[in-house]
Amino acid sequence: MNIQFLGATGTVTGSKYLLSAGSAKVLVDCGLFQGYKQLRLRNRERLPLHPSELDAVILTHAHLDHSGYLPLLVKNGFKGKIYCSEATFELCKILLPDSGHLQEEEASYANRHGFSRHSPALPLYSEADAVRSFAFFSPVRFDTDFQVCEGLSAHLHRAGHILGAAIVSLQSAEATITFSGDLGRPNDLIMLPPSLIEKTDYLVVESTYGNRRHDSADPAILLGKTIRDTAARGGVTIIPSFAVGRAQALLYAIHLLKAGGDIPAALPIYLNSPMAVDATEIYHKHRQDHRLDYQQCEAMFRTAKIITSVEESIALNQRQLPMVIIAASGMATGGRVLHHLKAFAPDPRNTILFVGFQAGGTRGAAMIAGADAIKIHGEYVPLRAQVSQIDNMSAHADADEILDWLSHFSSPPRQTFITHGEPAAADALRRRIEEKLHWSCRVPDYLESVELP
């Protein structure tokens, strides 16, 4: 076997791993690069092989940094199957068309207002391109072996993280290689803990929080305090959030806070996401993949008024009353949250609250670092609102939790590759694994190709 790292090296975005076994060529994950411009430009670069040469794609989960390149792959000639869990396919049917629609909207906005350096500005792919990719999906069940192509079988284990997320193990005649995907946390509010893996010849493990330990304090306490304090100032709490995964965890946490009297029961909560209604049904349909029962799912989605139309979204920006707005994207790289930031970031009464990892080069990372203005749609918006982060509400395992997951292997892999982390995080995890577990580790480079003997 041979593995080539086409993404998620030196960054937490763009996850793509090209695995060659005999004549078979399989892509594990097919994500978009986000953040720094030099990373985003990679989305427009050619892959080292033509998409038609690929036999299959296997997704670990539906987040766009793992799935968002798929419509472009299909548009450029991919004809194989896309394997993933059943819930991941359901979420991709929501997330991928939305991604294409947002790209079309942003390109149209740039063309109308003339702030793009390209004339005309073009999306990577359209909403229609995303819908066309659905014909290639072939969802499979967790904990069941399936044939990927001749000489290569696979198995999906639950990874936690978000609904449908998987740890992917691939088996050839010579060896087994396992991809952690994004590992969830053992005590997540909604998701089940990651499955334990006993053995693999090669391991590719994420390192998003490879140099950090999540605060042990209850994140709901800080969430409640931030919302209360902002409302007391007469302000609005804006929470950039991934529309599927983090948004649901936030809604359930806010439901519990309201039920416990920790935030005012009458405080308006808005989820500005056209896809939220569909996501509700997916959580109901796949209750075996998370901790919530039917009543808890219903309570979670009754917590907020769901905003679906553009007109409703615009109207929110005219309100000056205390409220909470949850809107995508989670790193403020695009989507409806940008319009809310333009409206509310200049007012010091308001709070912008981040509840997940902010990749370098994103607006979220810049705001947390103390920027006094942020560039949105070609112009700088003053940032006078308070900016806060609840780091331990992340859906990613921290360094200790990753080490604990690795400690359950019955024997060391021949080689462990540390990916999906910024350089300091990936190298810190490498050192910890080498020192504590005495495994052979390496942090691969972008486009590096490695033979797996």
Image: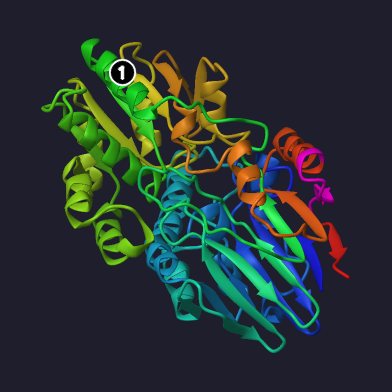
Q: Is residue 437 magenta?
A: yes
x and y percentages locating residue 428 in the rendered image: 75, 35
Query: The disc labelled 1 sits on which kind of residue?
Result: Lys
**Residue 234 location, quadrant:** top left
Give above or below for 432 relative to 371.
below
**Observer able to see residue 175:** yes
**Residue 79 location, quadrant:** bottom right
Give above or below for 349 relative to 5.
above
How many marks the image carries: the answer is 1
Q: Depth check: 327 or 303 in front?
A: 303
Residue at 65% from the left image edge and 86% from the top image edge: 149
Q: Main secondary structure of the magenta part?
A: loop
Residue at 78% from the left image edge and 78% from the top image edge: 21
Q: Depth check: 296 or 350 in front?
A: 296
User: Is 408 displayed left or right of 434 in the figure?
Assistant: left
Q: Is residue 343 magenta?
A: no
x and y percentages locating residue 206 in the rendered image: 65, 49
Q: In the rendered image, which quarter contains the C terminus?
A: bottom right
**Observer able to see residue 77:** no
x and y percentages locating residue 113 in the rendered image: 45, 39
Q: Which span of residues is magenta-colored?
A: 435-446
Residue at which label 1 appears = 225
| Label 1 environment density (alpha carbons within 10 Å; few <14, some 14–19, many ≥20) | few
User: Is 320 displayed left or right of 332 in the figure?
Assistant: left
**Residue 73 location, quadrant:** bottom right
x and y percentages locating residue 382 in the rendered image: 45, 17
